[in-house]
Every structure is written in C-alpha cells, then in structure tokens.
Image: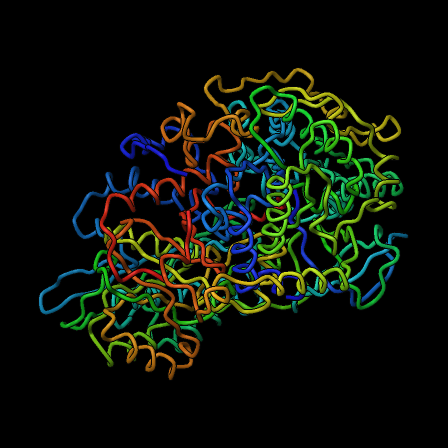
Amino acid sequence: MCLGVPGKIIEIYEVYGMRMGKADFGGLTKEICLAYVPEVELGDYTIVHVGFAITRLDEQSAQESLALFRQMRSLAEELGMAEVPLGQEMRG
Amino acid sequence: MSNAINIEAWSCPLPLRDHANIILGHGGGGKLSAELVQHLFLPAFQNELLAHLGDSAVLPLAGGRLAFSTDSFVVQPLFFPGGNIGDLAINGTVNDVAMSGAQPLFLSAGFILEEGMAMERLGVIAQTMGAAARRAGVLLVTGDTKVVDRGHGDGVYINTSGLGLIAADVNIAPHLARPGDVVILSGAIGLHGIAVMSVRAGLDFDTVIESDSAPLNGLVATMLETTTQIHVLRDPTRGGVASALNEIAKASQVGITLDERKLPVPAAVHAACELLGLDPLYVANEGKLLAIVPASVAEALLAKMQQHPLGRQATIIGQVTARHPGMVVARTGLGGTRVVEMYVGEQLPRIC
Amino acid sequence: MKYLDEFRDPDLARRLLDEIDAITTRPWAIMEVCGGQTHSIIRNGIDQLLPKQIELIHGPGCPVCVTPLAMIDKALAIAAMPGVIFCSFGDMLRVPGSAKDLFQVKSAGGDVRIVYSPLDALKLAQQHPDRQVVFFGIGFETTAPANAMTIFQAKRLGLQNFSMLISHVLVPPAIAAIMESPAHRVQAFLAAGHVCSVMGYWQYQPLVERYQVPIVVTGFEPLDVLEGIRLAVQQLEEGRAELENAYARAAHYAGNGVAQALLADVFEVTDRPWRGIGSIPQSGWQLRPAYHAFDAEIRFAVAHIHTHESPVCRSGDVLQGWIKPNACPAFGKACTPRTPLGATMVSSEGACAAYYQYGRFIQSDELLPQDSVTRG
C-alpha cells in the first residue's frame, strides 16, 4: 500500500495536459506524474508512489526529527561505555 | 514470540500435485524450481553423479576428472544494457564449469530460432558469442540449430554445454561448507537483474544500469593458485545471493550468517530496488561468485582476488555456522536479525 | 539516498530503542496498520530489538491480504479472456483465488503483465487499440490518487479499450471495525504514513475520542517506525489517548487537497468485504456513475463469479490480532508459503508468512547449543 520513495525533482513538463517530470532517486532517474503537487519546484523532494508524487518532503521537519533523535542518550553513553557488550545488543 | 512448532508437519510430500502446468515460478530459481528438479527430473534420471546438484557435474574418467555443465538461455529482452543473450550463453556455462574449480575448455551451442527472427540480430548474437568465447579462452566446438513456428520461440533460445578439466588437488562442491568457514563475495550485486528489468516495459528507468555478465574462470584460476582449500564456489544467478546461499546451506546442512552491512550494492541498483520494492539479495548476477573457504585462508585469498579485475570489490560477507542448519540468517543494518528465506517462485516488484 | 539513509542510521536507532526500553514498564500491544510498515519491521529485525513487553500486531493494511476473494476471482476470469491484456502490480500475482492465481492464468495463455504504475497500463491501451487493457486497481488511499488520475485521463483521451477493476479500501473504517470487535487486543495504532500524506490525519481524531486509543501517524524507515512506537508507548504509559504525528516531513493534518478533490470526483464510498474479516460498511471506494464506462466489473460479464473461501483459513482473525498465526490449525501444515490458504501466508509481510520464517529460526536455534563463532 505504501511503498513511497523520496525523489528529487529535476525536470518539469507537460504530457497531454498533465503535469509530469523527472525525479532523481539517488542517481537513478525516472519519469513521474506531478499533477498532485502543483506547489513543487525544481530541486524539491517528493514521495513517489507507483509513479505519482503524492506530497512534498519538508526539509525542516526532517531536520527537527533527526535533531530530536540525536538528543536521546544511548544506553552506552549512560553506562559510560564505548559500546554495549554483545548479548545486550539483541533483545527478544 | 515463542512458538511450539512441529517441523515434521511442514513439508508437503508431493507438491507437484498443485500444478498441472508449468508456471513462470518454476524457472525462478526458488523453491518451485528446486521441487521440479527433485520430484520430476531427478527420479527420472536417477544417478549418483547428478545427486549432488552442483553447478556442474564432476565426472571421473580414466586419468582425471571432468566438469560438465549445461544451461539454457531464454532471457527477454534479447538485448539489454551491457550485453545480449549471447554473452550470457557463453559466460553462464563457462562460469558453471568454473564453479567446480575446473578450467573450462570446450562448449557446445544449440539454437532454437523463431521463424521470422531478423538475421541481423542473430548475427550480432553470434558475433558476441564468438568474442565472449575468445575472452574466456574456450572453444565452441559443436552445435545445432532448429527453427520453430512464429509465435513459439521468443526470437531465440540458446542452450550451451561445457566441459572442463579439474586438477587433482581440487575438491569443490556445494555440500563441502563447514562451520567456521568464511563466505566471500567477489563484487557488487544486483546489476544484471536490474539491467534486464530496466528495459522491460513498465519498469524502465532513464539511467543506464549495465549487466555484469563476465567469464569468471580467470578469477577462479587465480584463486586456486593461492590455495586449493576452497570448499564451495557458486555464481549467484537467478534468485541472487540469497538463493545460492540457501542451496549451499541445505546441501552442506550448515547454517550461514550474513552481515548486511558488508554487502556491496551499487547506488543505482540500491535506488532501483527501493523504487520497485526489491531486495538486492535476490536479484540475479552474471559476473560474480561466492566462495566458501576456511577462515585460515580467507585474508590471503581476498587480497589475491582484489588484484584481479573481476574481484576488485571482493569482500567477506558472512560465516558458516553449526547453528540453524539449512537456514540463512542476516544481521540487519540495525543489529536485528532476519531469516533470508528462499522465495517460492521469483521475486516480484511490490507496492506494499 | 537523501531522506532514506538518515532515517536508517543505526546509532540513532539504538538511541530510540534505548529510549523505548527506558520508558516501558508494562506489556503493550500496538498495531501497525500498513503492510509497508510490517515489511520494514521484519526486514530490519525491529520486532526482536524492541523490549519483550512490546507486542507488535500486524494489521490489515496490506491490499494483498484484504482484497476480497470474489474480486480476485473476477480478476482471474477477466485475465483469462482472449484479447485482454491484464495489468497488475507485482504484489497480486501469487494471491490465490478460489481455484488458482494470476501466474497460473498466465501459464494457461492469459496475457498478464506486471506494471509499476497504472499510467503504464494506460500507455499499453494506447499502443494496442485492438486489445482490451484492464488494470487491477487495488490498494488503500495511497494508491487511489494514481488510479483516479489514470481513469480521469482515460476519459479525457476518449479511450474505448481501457478499464479498471477497482477494489479500494479505506483505513479509518478498518480501525473502527477492529476496535468494535469484542475480542480485540490492540491498545494503540501506528497509522499509515502515506495514507495520511494523501488524506491527512483529521479522520482519526473521532476514532481517538470514541475508542480512547492512542493513534500515531508513522512513517516507514526504521527511525520512523521506532519514533511512532516510542510516542505510542509514552502515551500508553502516561494513560493518554491522543492523535500524534511522527511523520511530519511527509504527512500533514489536512493532507493533499488536490488529490482529495480528484478522488471525490472519481470515487464514491461503498460497503466493501475484506477478505477474512467480512463486510465493513462504508469502507471502500468504487467508481462514480460518470466513470462507469471504465469499470471493468461492468464491462466484463463477471457478475456470476462465486467464491469459495477456505473454511480452514483464519487470516481474518490473524489480521485483526485476535490470534497469532501459529494458533491456526492449518499453520505450517496445510498452509505454508509454498501452499498458502490465505493471503497472510502469500504476502511476504503477511503475519503468517513472517511467523513461518522467524519461527523456524527460533526453533532450530533452540535445538543446537550456542557456539562462539557467530555472535555479532
């Protein structure tokens, strides 16, 4: 249902009156439909699902999330160790 | 998640009952293919030399041992980035023979041509085969050609068989992996499968990813110069690294652990797999090999491989263990584990 | 790849896992709705890395698992018709209908093709004016905009040889149905991130309030899934029931207005049977009368299709989290990935298939003593 991959918009044009474009997925380019993201501009990133961009990716939100995760302390830091010993690495 | 499971009850005794006809999955390199061999062909052909089910058969003859292999090539499309069916037809069989540790010498080629196929295309394929044979140092010494009605042959099908000589001190077979052994992969995975998929309608990309089709006998010869203590060699074609390792794990009755972080995946293959929901471990390769060797010779062998043009990115990707025999388990990037199961048919692109 | 690699960072995953470990004091059962989330969890081994008290229940958010049997049988019937090119996403090809699957139809001579996008099927229709091209339009709200645009274009182009077999399902009614059933065990939901990219997540507020259950909009990469779980556990530990968004970079409260407008034009809500669960009212989409010319169910005579569900299969109970796969009497015996009775065993992220693989691993590990070679 939800395999959506981030792609960077590198070209925008029209086919049969539909807004289309080329997205760059980490070096691989493919044509996708941009009809649902009229606000997207060259250089923006979008989530692409079955050949359609369904939303623009918000860089600021992404950075905020990552910053939040970085603030969390790991068990290793809590214990003052370089690494957690084997055996505690995998639970369950 | 603790389970009380009765292993005995799991396998279906006569699975072929489920299919009155051949389906595509029977050619996928996964469980259906294995069952077709086990339950239809093996019982019909019953003999000891076949039973080991290696990439090539090792035949005792007066004075030495021969490796003998056959393979059929039905790839669609016939021409893809990086090569054509002719490259596969030569390199595929050269590699199967080389996986027994043999020096490939002679090949046969049988063609089934579709009525109406363009002569020029066949000419290019033939030229390609000649060039590939010369590159591999093998001779195409016999062949056959048949033509079938239009609509029955997809252009051309090619079968090649190959013969090679195995040196006396070499003993390589799928059932010889041992706990403590190390798993070496000769280079980056996923190129051929994605190259072929990328020109199929509906799955095409703009970026060109080329097949890695190549003859591995030179690399194998170099490896054997370093050490004869190579237990298993396998080229991970249909079904990818995952299927090849599963087959070895079952044949040797050992477990294999992989470290996913060590897998060399080119960026474009990675991106294509993300887009299609594919796992690179299951994507076909045509110019790579897996070597299972004792830990004591691994480093030296790896260094030697990395000096060879086809082994520059050779790396250790896993180990053989006595635990979970017959099963391949991977350590994920996160430090979790997942079972790398053999697919039933072929791996399919997904949206989910 | 940007926006992927950062959200797979093992160090940050470790921090999130440790944080979840630190705040978990009691057992909790959390359902991830989307099949893509299930796939990510199994693929990355997240379920084993979480504290033992957290149980992840794999939800019905996989179109492979819930497409009604009758719909699969109709697809098989259409695909077998001469002159038809039947196009589908790869996911659906191995799903068993009453008697067979699309692979077997192909083997018997049907022209069945895998496509990446419904627009590829549209292109095929333009390239083959003499053939009837039919696309299997399954999926949740994430996929519906693609299908809607394709139908819209087909109408604009005046194509006579293109149609879709529509079987769209909606997430919020499924969540309600799960919470309504007396035997449910779900205490919090990870809502499907890309469904919310399209539809927004305002629809979940009434569910949070009616059922007093935490719902966290969650993405798919390992850090996204872990963050969703962290917020859900935090709510449960603190006795809160709120709607939160853990996928802010791709999902917003109102969703995609342009997509929603076209969806409203092309589709209307209908009751839908969910395979293994039964009919859930107002839980699906079908084509509006203005687009009936492109409805494959109407164009092809498939109304007479009868369905025979395996009486043994308990996919529905598994999908709703009532039972674990190995509690089903057919699990591992009559039903294996090789011979699936229901979709949860066919789909690689179906709960039954996942259990089958991992369960074997656990079992065999217990059979042999640990040896020192393999750790790490």
Q: Image point 18% across, 70% down: which residue?
A: B170
Whether residue B121 is visible to the viewer of this picture, yes or no, is: no
Q: Image point 39% across, 23% down: which residue?
A: C329
Q: In the image, A57: left or right of B94?
A: right
Quarter of the image with the N terminus of chain C in it: bottom right
Of residues C36 and A87, the one drawn nearer to the viewer in this rendering: A87
Q: Position of residue B6 (x, y in %)?
A: 29, 31
Q: How many marks?
A: 0
Q: Position of residue C57 (x, y in %)?
A: 54, 36
Quarter of the image with the C terminus of chain C in it: bottom left
Of residues B86 and A62, the one drawn nearer to the viewer in this rendering: A62
Q: Position of residue C204 (x, y in %)?
A: 75, 35
Whether residue C15 is visible to the viewer of this picture, yes or no, is: yes
Q: Position of residue B1 (x, y in %)?
A: 41, 39
Reply above or below: C166 against C247.
above
Choose top left, top right, bottom left or bottom right for residue B139.
Answer: bottom left
Of residues C16 and B240, the one drawn nearer to the viewer in this rendering: C16
How was the colour assigned to the protein in this rendering?
Answer: rainbow
Q: In the image, B223: left or right of C263?
A: left
Choose top left, top right, bottom left or bottom right for residue C28.
Answer: top right
Q: In the image, C227: left or right of B138?
A: right
Of residues C289 and B126, the one drawn nearer to the viewer in this rendering: C289
Q: Image point 64% across, 47% down: which residue?
A: C231
Q: Image point 50% across, 55% down: which residue?
A: B75
Choose top left, top right, bottom left or bottom right for residue A89.
Answer: bottom left
Query: In the current view of this chain or complex, which residue is farthest to the left?
Result: B62
Q: In the image, C153: left or right of B189?
A: right
